[in-house]
Image (cartoon, helix red, strand yellow):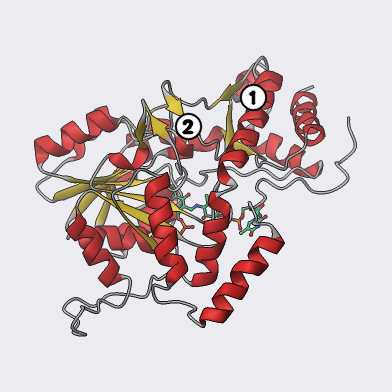
Amino acid sequence: MSEPFKKPIKIVQPLLPDLEDMDQKIKEIWDSKQLSNNGEKVVQLERRLANFLNAEYLSVFSNGTLALQLACRVLELSGEVITTPFTFPATVNALVWNQLKPVFCDIEEETYNIDPDKIEALITEKTTAIMPVHVFGNPCDVEKIQQIADRHGLKVIYDAAHAFGVRHHGKAIASFGDITMFSFHATKVYNTIEGGALVFKHPYLKERADQMRNFGILPDGDVLEPGTNAKLNEVQAAVGLLLLDKVEEEIRRRKEIAATYAEELGDIPGIRINKPVDGLEYNYPYFVITIDKNEFEISRDVLYEELKAHNIITRKYFYPLCSNLQCYKDLPSADKARLPVANKVADSVLALPLYGELSHEEVAYICRIIRESRL
Ligand code: T4K
């Protein structure tokens, strides 16, 4: 068996601006003495992001979770919202923070996304929206979901935390649904350290969200609806501006690494690689495999420990499943028998290290340990 790697291989390494470029931006901010509250850099970032993401109406926020919360608020949702259990807790938490009841729908085994064929059975007279997640950047079946929403008069909010820059059959990922949320957390393909954005279908939604991220203050100074503080600051916006020039190169490198992984691991019995769907311009946010314990001979959990013992840090995204968390497990829709695919996937999934600076030596080492672990 191989020796542990000389230094820990992290699952993610944040994309960083060059220090000299950052110095220059900091100097500009210091000179302006405007540190937050819709300063010049935030305005510039919103314009450039709108352009990059093909979005007509876009706003940035201090993180993706608050952005999702505000999306529910500006759409005036109430009652029940159908969502996926196979996601980061932030998705479901955002509903509960708006006094909305999450209703879990099972997922597709191929894409890990919400299964559109199982949504309609969950709709009641209390349902007001669907909140699907483009899991690991793979687009949901947006057409089927929109047809269901139209038939039942429901809103659609996409959690596209992982899907920055993704295009499907030539269409930008944010062109679907009423609102789409992107996360710009440090661990994402593109980041502003902490941050997020909403892309809106209608300008009035952007107008309301812009007020709500600034305490709900209206142009005349009055507050009609109490808002929150979800503003991005100027230093974070500067990071975002600089990283917009680097993100395409980052994605290109990740694509190469993902191809190496696929080549090295593709023929191992019991390993299935989560592949981008057809017709996709993908962003390679994670490299995810699922382990079939019977064929691979050891379980996902044993493989995780084996990799850890060799200084390779992986993540069981998304385990535990949201529907099995203490705070959600007693919901009627959280019953394991109703979510067989999601439970199976959550028990077998493993995200491997993926970032532009991951070296060929590191990828080769990770693949070797995975092969050796079943011997
Ligand atoms: N919806 C979905 C589907 C999401 O996945 C997320 C966030 C959200 C909504 C909410 O968006 P935000 O409010 O976060 O904008 C991480 C991230 O914190 C979280 O943003 C992300 N999803 C989630 C999938 O991953 P953890 O708890 O796994 O993070 P942590 O601290 O364990 O870090 C992961 C690895 O990254 C570690 O190996 C260390 C490394 N790392 C991390 C940071 C922050 C670094 O090397 N440098 C760093 O600065 O949640």
Q: Nearer the viewer, residue 5 or 215?
A: 215
Instruction: State left or right for residue 261 relative to residue 129.
Output: right
The structure residue drawn at horizontal position 25% and vertical position 27%, both measured from the top left corner, is 117
Residue at which label 2 appears: 344
Q: What residue type is labelled 2?
A: Lys
Give the image quadrant in which the ligand numbered 1 is located.
bottom right
* Position in image of residue 182 (x %, y %): 41, 51
Q: How crowded is mark 1: few (under 14 residues within 10 Å), some or many (20 or more)?
A: some
Instruction: State left or right for residue 35 relative to residue 307.
Output: left
Looking at the image, the residue that sits furthest to the bottom is: 221
The structure residue drawn at horizontal position 38% and vertical position 56%, both measured from the top left corner, is 47
Q: Nearer the viewer, residue 11 or 59?
A: 59
Q: Which of marks 2 and 1 is in front?
A: 1
Q: What residue type is labelled 1?
A: Ala
Using the rendered view, name the quadrant where residue 204 is placed: bottom left
Q: Is residue 240 above or below residue 85?
A: below
* Residue 110 appears in view: no
* Position in image of residue 264 (x %, y %): 71, 21
Residue at which label 1 appears: 259
At mark 2, the secondary structure is helix
* Residue 29 appears in view: yes
Instruction: State left or right for residue 349 relative to residue 343.
Output: right
